[in-house]
Image: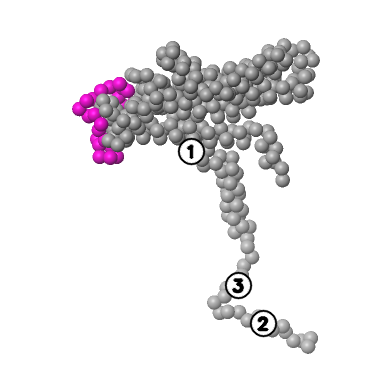
């Protein structure tokens, strides 16, 4: 029928009429979604493990720079009345937060000074190793021919020689001092930098920018320093970050054997070496430097992998593919 009305829709007595969503209601959800996207992008760019590793490395550098201010005692100060005192968290006193060793020396103070010495050795040795490797790699890529073959033969010889045996022989024959020890450690891992520098330099010379600079009459020094090195620096930095933790572990191993840093100077490996005799009676002497060695080497390795992902153009191109 034309005059009939449509039947009314049944409605529950408790039901409330629905209202159209206003722009003010949708705004918070859009803001929360954008905030979640920002958090996701931040975590992808800065994973929590990388943030922890960067924080730990920064803390170690801070300790190395301000050891004299942070250390409560001198690393060689003796207190025979407090020898083998337990750390504060194991029932000891607050005078020695990490306890004392067999001569009553404060473990915390020795740990802080050990971080300074170990990082000094690692940084100086890595810098020497990288310099030797990059220079020989550039020389091999520039001259080619018999010079390149000689450099490659030297690289193969270095790679085939167990460095620990070489280090033991040199330290046993020439004795030990900190400059000699740093110079010796500087010969570790240079062959890796040399291989990388040679390969990347040969590839760069075949590209347009290097060939154009050469055609303009630039000297080889200017070509390599001003144009080639800045373009291959990212890959070299990644390789250096792989050498750095290995140097820390190698220094710790040699100091553990008594051939590294000599008393009264202290290092992380030196502390571990002297603490092994008290592993059952005073384990804190060994565990504190061991934990610092593990966390430092682990943090640098994590940052090296992260830098490789961020700086390696090959990996960036693969990640950009749909």
Figure colour scheme: one colour
Reading the image, the residue beneath label 2 is: 8
Taking the view exactly as shown, the residue that stands out farthest to the bottom is 1
> Residues under labels 2 and 1: Cα distance?
65 Å
Q: Tell which circle, 2 or 1, labels the residue nearer the N-terminal end.
A: 2
Residue at the image point whose x is 37% and y is 19% from the top: 262
> Residues under labels 3 and 2: Cα distance?
15 Å
The one of 272 and 309 positioned closer to us in this rendering = 272
Question: Does 303 lie within the magenta span?
Answer: no
Residue at the image point whose x is 69% and y is 17% from the top: 148
Residue at the image point whose x is 45% and y is 24% from the top: 251
Reading the image, the residue beneath label 1 is: 52
Residue 248 in the image, given as x and y percentages of width and height = 47, 27
**Badge 1 element:** helix
Q: Tell which circle, 1 or 3, labels the residue nearer the N-terminal end.
A: 3
Residue at the image point whose x is 55% and y is 29% from the top: 242
Report the magenta stretch's main SS. Answer: loop
> Residues under labels 1 and 3: Cα distance?
52 Å
Reading the image, the residue beneath label 3 is: 17
**Left or right position of 43 against 113:** right
**Left or right position of 169 against 14:** left
- The residues colored magenta run 71-93
Question: Does 81 lie within the magenta span?
Answer: yes
Residue 168 in the image, given as x and y percentages of width and height = 45, 20
**Crowd around label 1: few <14 · some 14–19 · many ≥20 (10 Å):** some
Nearer the observer, disc 2 or disc 1?
1
């Amino acid at each position: 029928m034309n005059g009939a009305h449509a039947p009314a829709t049944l409605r529950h007595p408790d039901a409330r009429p629905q209202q159209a969503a206003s722009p003010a209601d949708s705004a918070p959800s859009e803001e929360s979604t954008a905030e979640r996207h920002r958090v996701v992008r931040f975590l992808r760019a800065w994973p929590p493990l990388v943030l922890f590793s960067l924080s730990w490395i920064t803390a170690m550098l801070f300790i190395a720079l301000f050891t004299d201010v942070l250390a409560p005692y001198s690393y060689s100060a003796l207190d025979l009345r407090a020898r083998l005192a337990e750390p504060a968290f194991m029932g000891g006193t607050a005078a020695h937060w990490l306890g004392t060793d067999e001569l009553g020396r404060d473990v915390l103070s020795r740990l802080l000074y050990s971080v300074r010495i170990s990082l000094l050795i690692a940084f100086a040795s890595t810098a020497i190793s990288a310099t030797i490797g990059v220079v020989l790699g550039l020389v091999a890529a520039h001259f080619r021919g018999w010079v390149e073959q000689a450099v490659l033969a030297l690289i193969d010889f270095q790679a085939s020689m167990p460095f620990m045996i070489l280090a033991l022989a040199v330290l046993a024959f020439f004795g030990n001092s900190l400059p000699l020890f740093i110079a010796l450690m500087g010969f570790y891992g240079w062959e890796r930098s040399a291989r990388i520098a040679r390969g990347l330099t040969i590839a760069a010379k075949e590209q347009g920018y290097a060939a154009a600079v050469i055609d303009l009459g630039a000297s080889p020094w200017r070509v390599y320093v001003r144009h080639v090195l800045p373009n291959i620096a990212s890959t070299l930095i990644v390789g250096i970050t792989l050498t750095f933790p290995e140097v820390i572990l190698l220094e710790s191993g040699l100091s553990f054997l008594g051939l590294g840093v000599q008393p009264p100077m202290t290092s992380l490996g030196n502390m571990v070496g002297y603490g092994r005799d008290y592993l059952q009676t005073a384990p804190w002497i060994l565990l504190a430097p061991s934990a610092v060695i593990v966390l430092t080497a682990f943090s640098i390795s994590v940052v090296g992998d992260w830098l490789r992902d961020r700086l390696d153009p090959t990996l960036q191109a693969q990640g950009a593919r749909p």
